[in-house]
Structures are given as structure tokens and as C-alpha cells.
Image (cartoon, helix red, strand yellow):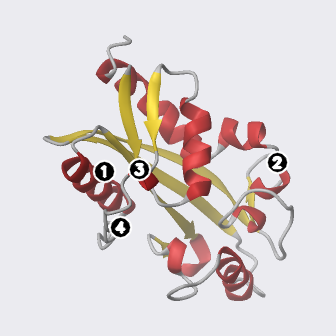
Amino acid sequence: MRDLLIATNNPDKFREISALLAHLPIRLYAMDHFPHLEPVEEDRATIEGNAAKKALETARETGMLCLADDTGLFIEALDGEPGVFAARWAGPGCSYRDNRIKAIEQMRGISNRRASFRTVVALAAPDGIIGCMEGRVDGSITSEERGERGFGYDAVFEVEGTGKTYAQMTDEEKNSLSHRALAIIAMLPVLEQVAGLD
């Protein structure tokens, strides 16, 4: 059985990715197996760059096969903000709710509420990047928080064609049409090949 390190310190992301990979005969490891490792600085200008950097640096530090992701929220009326800075849009040390409230405030009085979530997943071995895949979901920013589930911007992002925010969906619903799920699904054939399952 092949070992795979999910290179994130976010327990919500780890849980979501683990559920998406649960059917594969791969042993998953979280970053808490490596408490000595410093978090990788996400200083690239794109989500692709950050995902690749996290995957490769963590693979080299641990000697393991690593999967990392980075996600951006791109709001059309705000010229693509917060984009790659989605996780820390409301400032250093901000909470998920701080970011959601900023999104609601920034969009007050704006009729064009279109937005997209994009996630890039990168797979790396210590000797280099194996592959990168992207998932994208279009939707809109709501005028108030809706729903109690999920994390991040889930309560203010209504998925196109559903009438629901991610926070109003069950885990099964979200995992069937989230940006992260789409990126992981696109990566599955690569993971299966690397794990010798194809």
C-alpha cells in the first residue's frame, strides 16, 4: 500500500480530501505526523504556484509522496478579489467568519454577484512535481450567511444551479460538486497510476 501525505495544516481540508480518497488503497498521513516541519510560505502569485510549492517542498522535507492544494475565491465585481489571498483576506490571524463578513460588506449594493471558486491540487514526489489538476465551480456571493455546515466561505457562496450555499449542503452533496472535489477527481487517474492501481 502506497503512503500519501496530505500537505495541509487545515483539519477541515484534510477531512474533506480524506473522504474523497477513501476508496483508494492508499494510506493517508496528516501533517501532525511531522510536527517539526514549518508551514510552507504561500508566497506565489497564483493558486497553481502555491499548490505546487507546498507539494514539492513538503515532499522533499519528508521524503514522501505529497498532495497539496490551494484555493482561491474570485469575485467578478471586485476584479477577482480576494483570489489567491482568500484565506487571509480580512487580515493576519483572521477567522473564517471574518472573511465571510468582509465578502458581504464588500458586495453591499453591488448587483453583479458572480464569483467562482478554483482549487488546484498538486501531487509531488521528492524529485519533482508529478501533476497538477484544477477544479472550478461558478456561483454567486449571497447577501447574508446561509447554512451551518462547511468552512471558509461556504456560507456565503451559492453554487450555480442549486439555490444552496455549500454550508446548506450535506457532506455528500458538497463532495459531489465542490471545486476541491472536482480537482481531486481529476487527479485520481494520476494517483492510481502512481500507486500502481491502473
Mark 3: secondary structure = helix
Does the residue at mark 1 contact the one at mark 2 (Cβ under 8 Å)?
no
Dot 2 alpha-carbon crowd within 10 angstroms: few under 14, some 14 to 19, many 20 or more: some
> Which is nearer the N-term, disc 2 or disc 3?
3
Tell me which label, 1 or 2, sits earlier in the chain: 1
Q: Residue at x 39, y 51 (%)?
A: 7
- Name the secondary structure under disc 1: helix
Residue 169 — which label?
A: 2
**Which residue is tagged 3?**
33
Hey, which quadrant is residue 132 in on the image? Answer: top left
> Mark 2 or mark 4: which comes first in sequence?
4
Of the numbered discs in the image, which one, if any, rests on residue 39? 4
* Alpha carbon distance from label 2 to label 4: 31 Å
Residue 104 located left or right of residue 58: right
What is the x, y in percent for residue 98? 67, 83
Look at label 4 and name its amino acid: Pro
Q: Which residue is at a point 49% across and 41% down the rendered structure image?
A: 183
